[in-house]
Amino acid sequence: MVVALLFFYTMINFFDRLVLGLSAVPVMRELSLTPAQYGLVASGVYWLYAVSGVAVGLFLVNRVSTKWLLVGLVLIWSVAQVPAALTSSLSVLIACRVLLGIGEGPGSPSAYEACHSWFPPEKRNLPTAIFLQGAPVAFLVGAPFLSWVIVECGWRFSLLLCSSLGAIWIVAWFALAKDGPFSGSAAKACAAGDQAVSPVPWAALWLDRTMIGNYVLGFSAYWIVGVTVAWQAPYLQMGLGYDGKVVGWLIAAMTAAQPFVLLTISYLSERALGSGASSRVARGAVNAACLVASGVLLAAAVMIEGAGFTKLALLALGTTLPSVTTVLGAAMVSEIAPTSQRGTALLVTYSAITVAGLLSPLTMGYAVQAAGQAEGFVYGYLIAAALLVFAGMLGFLLLDPEGSKRRLNAISSESQVDRQSSSQLGVSHAG
């Protein structure tokens, strides 16, 4: 039930992001926005995205039930859409996107914690992949549906529709959801196979090589999310010349393979773990290889002249493969972080990487404005491709969950010994 509800949670989350990209052309036309100004609006959702995620990770996630936390976040999403639908002011539109980002920043990492609280470490790949399918389904179903709504009813009505979906989800989640037996506050989580309950110094965790590898891979993967959500529809319409009504169906078709790709890779990774493969290979190497392949495919896609099937297929696969990071990367963080620190580790890590979502729409917007639509989109996608290849190669070197677990367990044991020695010394002095 929780995984199913998180699936719809993720779907609504991406509806809220996708709707602006699908509305880009009518919004720019009605509000007289330049590509750079639209890039500024699109990036607004990420201005405080990371800040809110880190703040919730440090101060709330270990103190507030994920049930109540997700209710509050979706409430912010729903409220943020209303004034955006009623305004003709660029400043108000940006402010609404910033508010939306404040609510969405802690969203996915909090969903990871809610999901992982129901499954032991070795069984987290597949349920995580399942609830994350809400994102491609949002593109698959939402792109044609929202495109139709935008054309027939206007972009303002589409924002109000997204707000209503969030309100409906809150009612269902409040009525049906609860925290699982592997939650960060559950003592039996350690006995069931989670990492040591005793916390380690935060500096040791943040500077661990596997954590750093996840920052790098996550940043590059989220760069693609920012580009896809904000600029894929404008690219198809402005760069390749497709009609606005066709664009929604094209995005749906380009997203159709993502559930199959993500579920298949997640399942094979989990099966490899069950067969004795190391997490470094089954999760780390697979994750890194997907990013390198994605960069190569994106570069090939934009270098092909015209707007044919091959170009769209390469573009679709190139923007799909980085999504593997959302499953395997989160699983590696949960694998190495002590149970009592897992929620904070997930929220801080997967909030910090969303800074890429702030930078990538702006980068693409300025590239299009500086070089023109034809060349600007090519330059923007080539920048993304280079970043993906670099991150994937670095990931091969850094990701080592087993080594990180041994290191952090040793630090945890040393900390326990130091605390016991200090306690005994205190008793001796008191005597």
Image (spheres, rainbow, N blue to C red):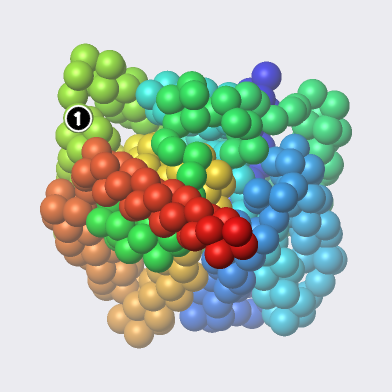
- Residue 87 x %, y %: 81, 71
Residue at 44% across / 60% down in the picture? 201
Residue at 51% across / 35% down in the picture? 132
Q: Which residue is mark 1?
A: 278
Q: Is residue 137 above or below residue 277?
A: below
Question: In terms of image quadrants, where is residue 112?
Answer: top right
The residue closer to the viewer here, 143 or 181, is 181
The residue closer to the viewer here, 111 or 421, is 421
Question: In terms of image quadrants, where is residue 104?
Answer: bottom right
Residue type at the position of mark 1: Ser
- Residue 357 x %, y %: 47, 64
Residue at 15% across / 49% down in the picture? 396
Image quadrant occupied by the C terminus: bottom right
Question: In terms of image quadrants, where is residue 43?
Answer: bottom right
- Residue 265 x %, y %: 30, 27
Q: Is residue 38 above or below residue 211?
A: below
Q: Residues within 10 Å of mark 1 (few under 14, many from 20)?
A: some
Residue lying farthest to the front in this orientation: 431
The residue closer to the viewer here, 239 or 370, is 370
| Residue 213 horizontal side relative to residue 299, left or right | right
Image quadrant occupied by the N terminus: top right
Label 1 secondary element: loop
| Residue 124 horizontal side relative to residue 113, left or right | left
- Residue 177 x %, y %: 75, 27
Residue lying farthest to the bottom in this orientation: 370
Q: Is residue 362 above or below residue 212?
A: below
Q: Is residue 159 above or below residue 355?
A: above
Residue 124 makes an appearance in the image: no
| Residue 396 horizontal side relative to residue 92, left or right | left
Residue 328 makes an appearance in the image: yes
Residue at 59% across / 69% down in the picture? 51
